[in-house]
Image (cartoon, rainbow, N blue to C red):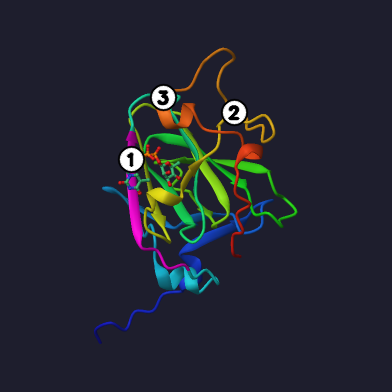
Amino acid sequence: MACAKKRLEETLVQITTTKLAGVLILSPARFGDARGFFSESWNRKTLAAQGITLDFVQDNHSLSAQIGTIRGLHFQSPPHAQAKLVRCGRGCLFDVAVDIRRDSPTYGQWLGEELSDQNGRQLLIPAGFLHGFITRAPDTEIIYKCTDYYAPACDGAVRFDDPDIGIDWGLPAGVAPILSDKDAAAPLLRDLDTPFVFEG
Ligand SMILES: Cc1cn([C@H]2C[C@H](O)[C@@H](COP(=O)(O)OP(=O)(O)O[C@H]3O[C@@H](C)C(=O)[C@@H](O)[C@H]3O)O2)c(=O)[nH]c1=O
């Protein structure tokens, strides 16, 4: 009979919690064969079976040509805060999330995860976090789903090297990252003038 094959949604993605509540590492199953592999990079039903329901409305894709490029640390303030599901389409990057939820016991803490075309890993970052990454290979592509639309008026940035956050980007001593003008001029977290209250 057509369409009779059943599959176990829970087995299609492995989910790992992190030290920051709400930030998750997702490893979707990869089905390899002589051609390469197949993987469902996002499936609403599969994630819902594991208790993750997010309403994504925009997909972003960017290419960073040079190794050592940093984009971040970025956020959108309420009412246009975004949760993001991040993965690497090509190359390799170190993806970083920083908790800026005012009432969070881990406010100001960061975590990083290597995402690559090889490991297929994804980072789920809730609203209320700064997000940024550094490329660890040339011509690295990042692809991420967002739960709210781009809203330039709510777009904000914090310095990648804010000493209060203290992210170890893995840059060799004395090597400067490649940054946009906006990111090079970003303020420190402590100088953000709005006490954002993020939901969740
Ligand atoms: C983020 C974004 C930018 N743009 C435009 C604005 C600008 O002209 C151009 C480049 O924008 P940016 O320099 O902000 O791009 P980029 O530095 O790649 O910004 C991104 O960084 C990562 C770390 C994130 O988490 C994203 O949310 C986003 O902030 O693209 C859109 O049209 N839609 C968007 O959603």
Q: Which of 31 and 49 lies nearest the eye of the viewer?
A: 49
Which of labels 1 and 3 is toward the front? 1
Determine if the magenta segment contains residue 23.
no
Residue bearing the label numbered 3 = 67
**Magenta extent:** 54-63
Label 1 environment density (alpha carbons within 10 Å; few <14, some 14–19, many ≥20): few
Dot 1 beta carbon under 8 Å from ligand 1:
yes
Q: Is the C terminus in the top left, top right, bottom left or bottom right quadrant?
A: bottom right
Q: Quadrant of residue 118?
A: top left
Label 3 environment density (alpha carbons within 10 Å; few <14, some 14–19, many ≥20): some
- The answer to whether the residues at label 3 and label 2 have Cβ atoms under 8 Å apart is no
Q: Does 59 sit above or below residue 111? A: below
Residue bearing the label numbered 1 = 62
Q: Three-letter amino acid code at disc 2?
A: Asp
Q: Is residue 136 visible?
A: yes
Residue bearing the label numbered 2 = 161
Q: Earlier in the sequence, mark 3 or mark 2?
A: 3
Q: Earlier in the sequence, mark 1 or mark 2?
A: 1
Determine if the magenta segment contains residue 61.
yes
Q: For the residues marked 1 and 2, what is the alpha-carbon distance in whole angstroms?
A: 22 Å
Mark identifier at residue 156: none
Which of labels 3 and 2 is toward the front? 2
Q: Secondary structure at mark 3?
A: loop
Q: For the residues marked 1 and 3, what is the alpha-carbon distance in whole angstroms?
A: 14 Å
